[in-house]
Amino acid sequence: MKHYIEELKQTIDEVYNHLHENPEISWQEYKTTDYLQAFLEGRGFNVQLFGECPGLVAEIGKGSPCVAVRTDMDALWQEVEGKFQANHSCGHDAHMSMVLGAILLLQKAGFPSKGKVKFIFQPAEEKGTGALRLVELGVVDDVDYLYGVHLRPIQEMRHGEASAAIYHGAATFLAGEIIGEDAHGARPHLGQNAIEIGASFIHEMKNIHLDPMVPYTAKMTKFHAGSDSGNIIPGKASFSLDLRAQTNEVIAALTEKIEEIAEYLSKLHGVKISLEMKAHVAAAEVDEEARRFMENAIIDGLGENQLKDPIVTSGGEDFHFYTLKKPNIKATMLGLGCDLQPGLHHPNMTFNREAIYSGIEILARTVMYTLDGEEAEW
């Protein structure tokens, strides 16, 4: 297999460089879609587009079972060296390169001999809504096994190491408003102090008690109230909340507690407190059979000593909506060490690009094991 990868390296380098230099933010990945479509169709692959929604699917083989490999496409919008721009600081350019490499590698090897493999290029992972949209479009209706990949920061894993599962946590992001009446600084009894209400909200969040065996956090990440007039007590404020938990059950319970706090403080202070969900991602549901297939692929590609324990992280990934919405899908996600630093989402994130080729091999071998089991050979 490795000689096939050597033959593909120049092509994959060109692909990565193009994707890295032409990032697009969530739901705007149209030029990326055009590039991927031209690349795949030019090599004989059947491609399915999604109409007005960016992204695409490429297929090889036919029949069942159906194995899918998914990659995210979008970049982040952030300040880089003093300028706000789209930036691939989460590694999605590398993920796309790996999935493209895997499909080319399987094509060179004449695989699959049975079943079908779908390669899903998904928009808007960073918004937490891309996977849900593809579920709505029926993209995974025929999928039996689903695999993904994510680069891991150096603090978790070194280059040359890999894990066959990432246990992402669930995350919910809420936007809130406190709507009361302003008051003169000398007459606080005639209005409501939104700043004090916000402080009470923070205090009440500290009193939330859920299952202590499951990690969870709730914090206020933005609060804005008042104006340039220092003698006005502001009755209105806007704020943001970041909720995280390691399971889907606990994130649901945590969200309910936050709603109860908003209702309680609203009645106590005589104001309206509204909460709007801006984004939500589900916690991981890892299938043990899919994980074993990927473990075998990692051992074959990197060696047994390089297979590491599953990663548990409070970070979120919308990949897990596929299994939440389609429980019949058996899924896991490759955690790939690559000496990524300083960290994911850092505007100047870098990683060892040699890891892309390891990822290509592991994903291709995982597909092979899933379709052919222990009899899989190259």
Image (cartoon, rainbow, N blue to C red):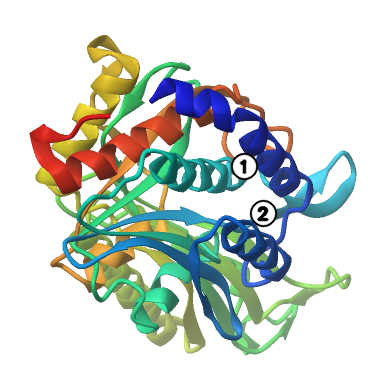
Q: Nearer the viewer, residue 228 or 190?
A: 228
Say left or right for 288 vs 162. Answer: left
User: Could you say which quadrant of the image residue 141 lies in?
Assistant: bottom left
Residue 178 is situated, as x and y percent measured from the top left of the image, at: 56, 80
Among the two numbered marks 1 and 2 on one chain, the one whose residue lies closer to the N terminus: 2
Label 1 sits on residue: 345
Q: Residue at x 39, y 31 (%)?
A: 361
Q: Secondary structure at mark 1?
A: loop
Q: Residue at x 87, y 73 (%)?
A: 229
Mark 2 and mark 1 in contact (Cβ < 8 Å)? Answer: yes
Q: Residue at x 48, y 44 (%)?
A: 104
In this figure, what is the number of numbered marks?
2
CA gap between label 1 and label 2 equals 8 Å
Q: Nearer the viewer, residue 74 or 317?
A: 74
Label 2 sits on residue: 76
Residue 185 is situated, as x and y percent measured from the top left of the image, at: 75, 75
Q: Secondary structure at mark 2?
A: strand
User: Could you say which quadrant of the image residue 306 lies in?
Assistant: top left
Specify few, some or many for label 2: CA neighbours under 10 Å numbering under 14, 14-19, or 20 or more.
many
Residue 289 is situated, as x and y percent measured from the top left of the image, at: 10, 44
Residue 298, compared with residue 242, is above or below; it is above
Q: Residue at x 45, y 64 (%)?
A: 58
Say left or right for 202 vs 354. Answer: left
